[in-house]
Image: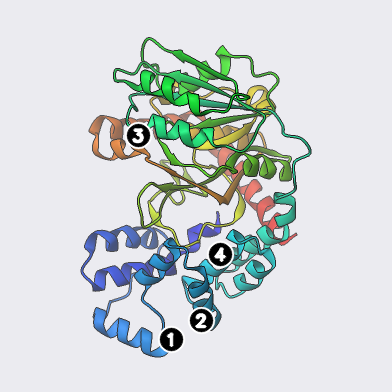
């Protein structure tokens, strides 16, 4: 399992703080992952006593203020605080994150030594030590085909396409399918593609009816000739903020891991404070139920800013090795329509073939996660998500899955120590 499964102490502290000020909703948000880890939440003192004791001993702002400083990129202040309190449960994560963001891997590695949990230290140490490999300039740009499936996103698709059009990568083409939208998505998208540079080829087609997300992506994969592409990228239709170097960074990461089938990054909601809804995921249960790590939304304090080998990365913006995708993994499973667990199952197939799924948390982007939000309040979609987990469990041999993931996890630990 990833080290992210062992962050219970940090979640306990956050839960304790929010309980002390009476914010039960946030208390429950942070207590859930802590309780899942098997840890017990301690009794809380009054907020006044906690804050007074904390500041008198360490002269530190409280946790909410530290996160606010991190969200506002007040790096100098945070590094000064971290230098005086290097083992602080948040600052010990924030400091390496800042050093990675400012391209100082040596300092990131040094500051990570103050993290209590061994695997967390190892991940950051490994990220620092392969930094130059991760950022090695490309010897020519491999060809990338970017697929975008859209459905009833007239409010979001223009911003998504405008953001993707600012991609600094040159050697890519775009393939868009309107999946039978009943609103003005097609008209909005048709206008928005004008933002792509002239050298970027754009193909658009409108499907007469909604065939679901997996079938829609399969249509984009089979309708067009992708034989000249080195990588297939998939982007959602409700991305709100995408760094211009996202594709360069993902291709560089794929090059640094020749055995990788897919590369993804860290997905944040569009609002602040920065809240993570997609990061490094591992399958933590595959028996009577299917569950993955880091499935809950989490406040971002740099705890996922590293590069690692995982079982699944968020499907809203990631790339595949084209040859592995077509020749080894295959198309998406249309029985998992509309979308719940389709990417988890697809990446699982790559893992069963022995390929790596690479998470690069130093690449972050913002996303509405409109479909995910709807599934939380729509009974039909919630039922569909439960049904899809059962389909995945019965599709794959459980013993084979567990044996394979255990073996790959052991290989990952050896890689971290190498």
The span from disc 1 to disc 3 (Cα, nearest Å) is 43 Å
Label 3 SS:
helix
Circle 2 is placed at which residue position? 85
Q: What separation in Å lies between label 4 and label 3 (alpha carbons)? A: 32 Å
Decide: few, some or many residues near mark 4? Use Cα within 10 Å; few <14, some 14-19, many ≥20.
Answer: many
Tag 4's secondary structure? helix
For label 1, the residue is 58
N-terminal-most mark, 4 or 3: 4
Q: Which residue is mark 4?
A: 98
182 shown above or below 51: above
- As drawn, is 292 to the left or to the right of 2? left
Q: Mark 3–mark 2 contact, CB under 8 Å?
A: no
Nearer to us in this view, 96 or 377: 96
Measured along the vertical axis of the image, is residue 252 above or below residue 236? below
The picture quadrant where one finds residue 146 is top right
Q: Is residue 341 visible?
A: no
State the residue at coordinates (52%, 67%).
Answer: 93
The location of residue 396, given as percent across then percent down, is: 52, 31
Q: Tell me the residue that label 3 is attached to.
A: 371
184 or 294: nearer the viewer: 184
Neighbourhood count class around disc 3 (C-alpha, 10 Å): few under 14, some 14–19, many 20 upward: few
Cβ atoms under marks 2 and 4 closer than 8 Å: no
State which tag comes first along the sequence, 1 or 3: 1
The quadrant of the image that shows the N terminus is bottom right
Label 1, secondary structure: give it: helix
Q: In percent of the image, x 75 and y 45: which residue is there?
A: 137
| Callout 1–callout 3 Cβ contact below 8 Å | no
User: How is the protein colored in the picture?
Assistant: rainbow
Question: Can you tell which quarter of the image residue 155 is in?
Answer: top left
* Proximity of marks 4 and 3: CB atoms separated by less than 8 Å: no
Q: 300 or 400, which is in the foreground?
A: 300
Q: Nearer the viewer, mark 4 or mark 3?
A: 4
């Amino acid at each position: 399992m990833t080290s992210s499964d062992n962050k219970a102490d940090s979640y306990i502290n956050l839960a304790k703080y929010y309980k002390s000020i009476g914010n039960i909703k946030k208390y429950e948000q942070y207590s859930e992952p802590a309780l899942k880890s098997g840890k017990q939440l301690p009794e809380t003192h009054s907020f006044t006593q906690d804050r007074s004791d904390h500041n008198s001993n360490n002269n530190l702002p409280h946790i909410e203020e530290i996160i606010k400083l991190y969200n506002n990129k007040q790096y100098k202040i945070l590094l000064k605080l971290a230098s005086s309190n290097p083992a602080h449960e948040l600052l010990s994560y924030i400091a390496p994150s800042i050093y990675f963001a400012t391209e100082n891997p040596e300092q990131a590695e040094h500051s990570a030594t103050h993290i209590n949990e061994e695997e967390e230290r190892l991940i950051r140490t490994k990220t620092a030590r392969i930094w130059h490999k991760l950022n090695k300039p490309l010897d020519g740009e491999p060809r990338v085909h970017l697929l975008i499936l859209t459905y009833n996103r007239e409010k979001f698709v223009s911003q998504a396409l405008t953001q993707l059009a600012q991609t600094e990568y040159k050697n890519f083409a775009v393939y868009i399918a309107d999946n039978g939208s009943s609103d003005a998505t097609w008209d909005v998208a048709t206008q928005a593609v004008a933002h792509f540079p002239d050298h970027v080829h754009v193909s658009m087609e409108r499907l007469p009816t909604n065939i679901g997300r997996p079938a829609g992506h399969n249509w984009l994969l089979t309708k067009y000739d992708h034989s000249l592409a080195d990588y297939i990228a998939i982007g959602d239709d409700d991305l709100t903020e995408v760094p211009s170097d996202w594709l360069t960074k993902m291709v560089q990461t794929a090059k640094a891991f020749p055995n990788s089938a897919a590369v993804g990054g860290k997905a944040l909601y569009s609002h602040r404070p920065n809240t993570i809804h997609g990061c490094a995921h591992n399958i933590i249960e595959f028996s009577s139920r299917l569950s993955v790590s880091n499935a809950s939304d989490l406040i971002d304090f740099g705890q996922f800013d590293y590069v690692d080998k995982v079982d699944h990365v968020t499907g809203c913006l990631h790339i595949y090795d084209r040859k592995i995708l077509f020749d080894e993994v295959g198309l998406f499973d249309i029985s998992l329509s509309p979308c719940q667990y389709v990417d988890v199952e697809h990446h699982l197939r790559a893992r069963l073939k022995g390929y790596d799924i690479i998470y690069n948390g130093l690449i972050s982007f913002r996303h509405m996660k409109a479909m995910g939000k709807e599934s939380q309040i729509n009974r039909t979609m919630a039922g569909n998500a439960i049904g899809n987990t059962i389909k995945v469990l019965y599709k794959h041999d459980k013993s084979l899955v567990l044996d394979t993931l255990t073996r790959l996890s052991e290989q990952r630990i050896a890689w971290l120590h190498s």
